[in-house]
Amino acid sequence: MKFLVYPFITLSLLISACGSSSNSSERSYQDPHSKMHQKMHDEFYLEEMQKELTGKWQIMLVGETIIDAKQFDGKQPVLIIDVSEGTYAGNDGCNSFKGKVSFKEDKIIFGPTAGTLMACPNMEVSGKIMNSINEKSLNYSMADQLILYEGNKKAMVLKRIE
C-alpha cells in the first residue's frame, strides 16, 4: 500500500507544481504584439490630440470672468498653440506673451510665460489670463470649444478662430 501512496503523492505534487509555474509565467508574459498595439494607439491618440489643439484660439472666459474685446479697447485676447514647435503665444488683451507647451494624455502643460509688461486698461483681467496658464498643467476637453480645467474648475474657455 505504501508503494502506491508515495508515487501518487509525488505525481500530485508534480502536477500541482507544473500548474502553478505555468500560471505565474502566463501572468508575467506580455504579448509583444499587444505592447506594440498599445504603443501605436498611444502615439496615434497623442498625434490626433495635438492636431486638434494647434491653432489660434479666442479667449472667451477666464475663471468666471467673461472676456469681451470692449474691455481692452477692441483688442480680443488670444492664445496660439503650435504643437509642432511645442510653443504657445498670444495676447492677454494688453501684453503679448509666449512660452513652451507640451502634452500628456489629457493634459496641456504650459511652461513659464515670458511677456511684455505694459500698463493697460483692465490689468486685473489680463493678470487672470496670465495666471491661468503660466506654469500650469491643465486638463482639457473639446467639443465646440476648448475648455481648460485646473482640477475640476474651469480655468479658461476658448473658441477656435484659425
Image: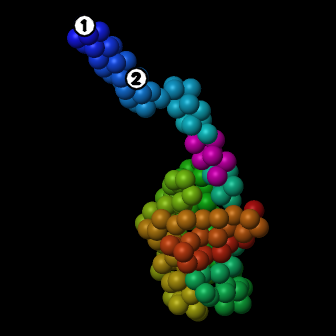
Nearest the viewer among 40 and 94 is 40
- Crowding at dot 2, Cα within 10 Å, few <14 / some 14-19 / many 20+, comes out as few
> Outermost residue, left direction?
2
Q: Are marks 2 and 1 in contact (CB under 8 Å)?
A: no
Q: Is residue 161 visible?
A: no
Residue 159 lies, with reference to residue 1, above or below; the image says below
Alpha carbon of mark 2 to alpha carbon of mark 1: how far?
25 Å
Image spot of residue 28 (x, y percent): 40, 30
- 80 inside magenta stretch: no
Give the number of marks: 2
| Residue highlighted by disc 1 | 3
Q: Residue at x 57, y 87 (%)?
A: 125
Q: Main secondary structure of the magenta part?
A: helix
Residue 19's disc is: 2
> For this view, does 38 lie left or right of residue 74?
left
Q: Amino acid at mark 1?
A: Phe
Q: To which quarter of the image does residue 120 belong?
A: bottom right
The numbered disc on residue 14 is none
